[in-house]
């Protein structure tokens, strides 16, 4: 009996026209079509039915989300299409063509401390499409970072223009599905979308000023970087926390990503000497923590010194390397602050590497995995992004820097 604003259609496809008539009689403005088995099937009769549904909705002034989609996740109002979604709101927005991929993104992002303002799963996009949702999030004051998963674009020029406007206002990170031949075939049967060449797509995203992700994992890595870090334009990185070969590999991965692993400047090395660091002439960047011979050198001291040195634009530390050492009764948040002197490093963009420590099947109570979870929770509370490998941290940082540099190319 009360006014109805929004209808979710779970009826079979053939019953949708009757539902739309009922919705029109109630003055409904939007219908989300969870209903599927339409144009994505490739069957001519299903394609025709989808078009007739669109024309009927347009005749009644009703906008459609879908069909073949999960719809809207809006935690502030308690709207969700899975019962296990976080109730906490955040500053990330999501435009996602796939329903199950949207679930993976939302849950995977929450594990990294990235929460959402609004998310749209839009499926076949017979009416409202990726450009409409992107335009909305670009001007949404609750959204600072936009994530997208797209299989096909309905209107290429409109999307490019919308993406360019959006990326000038806030970071837009995009993962494109269906780039390989098999993926393109799967795309057609999933959301009735046409895939294009990777080179063309990548060039379009670059020209628009947005950021391309090459995997679901990188999409979340990039979102975490933009979510927690301030704008970074310099590529000079200080790396600390590895031992022996891991510090060598860290240097390789950072340079492969496009970061500059600069040597310690003479004045920095002289400051190490005046601080009484016994291995002042041996240390280099990345800092190999295994050469520590006494208490004159600690990771916290080196991080604080690099944070205060203008030669370094950002810092990456390999946290713990399996040796998390909080004393009993000490919260890991406090331990990390003390161990890495985070208060002294707060003015420098700071990324951490926390390796995955999954327990084996026979050891589900593995202590290391529990400690890793506690450390990651503490880092989220401290608003510090973390990554499972140095390579993923480096590539996320490099792409983030590229975005900010494109915003002000003459800087």
Image: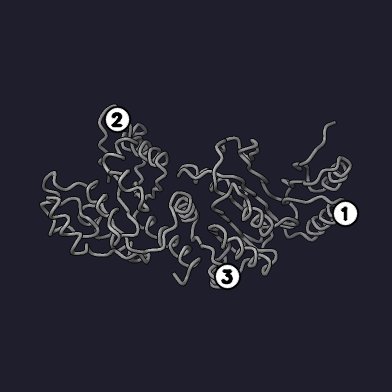
Q: Is residue 241 left or right of residue 290?
A: right
Q: Mark 1 or 2 closer to N-term? A: 1
Mark 3 and mark 1: span between their CA atoms?
A: 35 Å
**Mark 1 neighbour class, 10 Å CA radius: few under 14, some 14 to 19, many 20 or more:** few
Could you tell me if residue 359 is visible in this image?
A: no
Q: Is residue 316 left or right of residue 30?
A: left
1 and 2 marks in contact (CB < 8 Å)? no
The residue that mark 2 highlights is: 330
Q: Mark 3 or 1 closer to N-term? A: 1
The residue that mark 1 highlights is: 59
Question: Looking at the rendered structure, which numbered label has been put on residue 204?
Answer: 3
Question: Looking at the rendered structure, which numbered label has been put on residue 51?
Answer: none
Quarter of the figure with residue 400: bottom left
Q: Is residue 20 left or right of residue 154?
A: right
3 and 1 marks in contact (CB < 8 Å)? no
At a point 62% along the width and 38% down the height, the residue shown is: 76
Viewer-side residue, 31 vs 338:
338
């Amino acid at each position: 009996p009360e006014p109805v604003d929004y209808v979710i259609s779970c009826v079979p496809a053939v019953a949708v026209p009757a539902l739309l008539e009922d919705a029109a009689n109630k003055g409904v403005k939007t219908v989300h079509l969870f209903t599927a088995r339409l144009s994505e099937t490739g069957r001519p009769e299903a394609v025709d039915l989808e078009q007739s549904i669109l024309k009927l909705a347009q005749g009644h002034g009703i906008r459609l989300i879908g069909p073949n989609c999960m719809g809207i996740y809006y935690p502030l109002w308690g709207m969700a299409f899975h019962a296990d979604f976080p109730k906490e709101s955040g500053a990330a927005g999501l435009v996602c063509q796939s329903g199950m991929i949207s679930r993976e993104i939302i849950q995977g992002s929450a594990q990294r401390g990235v929460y959402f303002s609004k998310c749209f799963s839009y499926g076949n996009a017979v009416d409202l499409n990726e450009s409409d949702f992107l335009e909305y999030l670009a001007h949404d004051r609750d959204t600072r970072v936009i994530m997208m998963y797209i299989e096909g674009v309905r209107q290429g020029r409109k999307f490019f223009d919308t993406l360019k406007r959006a990326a000038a206002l806030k970071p837009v990170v995009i993962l494109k599905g269906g780039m390989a031949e098999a993926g393109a075939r799967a795309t057609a049967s999933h959301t009735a979308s046409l895939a294009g060449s990777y080179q063309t797509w990548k060039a379009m995203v670059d020209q628009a000023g947005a950021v391309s992700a090459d995997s679901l994992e990188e999409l979340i890595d990039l979102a975490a970087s933009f979510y927690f870090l301030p704008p970074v334009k310099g590529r000079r990185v200080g790396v600390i926390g590895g031992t022996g070969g891991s510090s060598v590999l860290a240097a390789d991965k950072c340079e492969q990503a496009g970061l500059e692993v600069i040597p310690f400047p003479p004045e920095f090395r002289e400051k190490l000497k005046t601080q009484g660091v016994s291995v002042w002439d041996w240390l280099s960047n990345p800092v190999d923590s295994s050469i520590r011979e006494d208490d004159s050198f600690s990771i916290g001291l080196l991080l604080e010194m690099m944070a205060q040195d203008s030669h370094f634009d950002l810092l990456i530390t390999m946290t713990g390397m399996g040796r998390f050492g909080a004393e009993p009764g000490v919260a890991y948040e406090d331990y990390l602050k003390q161990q890495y002197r985070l208060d002294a490093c707060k003015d420098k963009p700071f990324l951490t590497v926390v390796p995955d420590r999954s327990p084996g099947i026979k050891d589900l109570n593995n202590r290391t995995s529990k400690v890793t979870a506690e450390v990651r929770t503490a880092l989220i509370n401290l608003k510090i992004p973390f990554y499972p490998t140095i390579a993923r941290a480096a590539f996320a940082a490099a792409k983030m820097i590229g975005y900010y540099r494109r915003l002000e190319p003459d800087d």
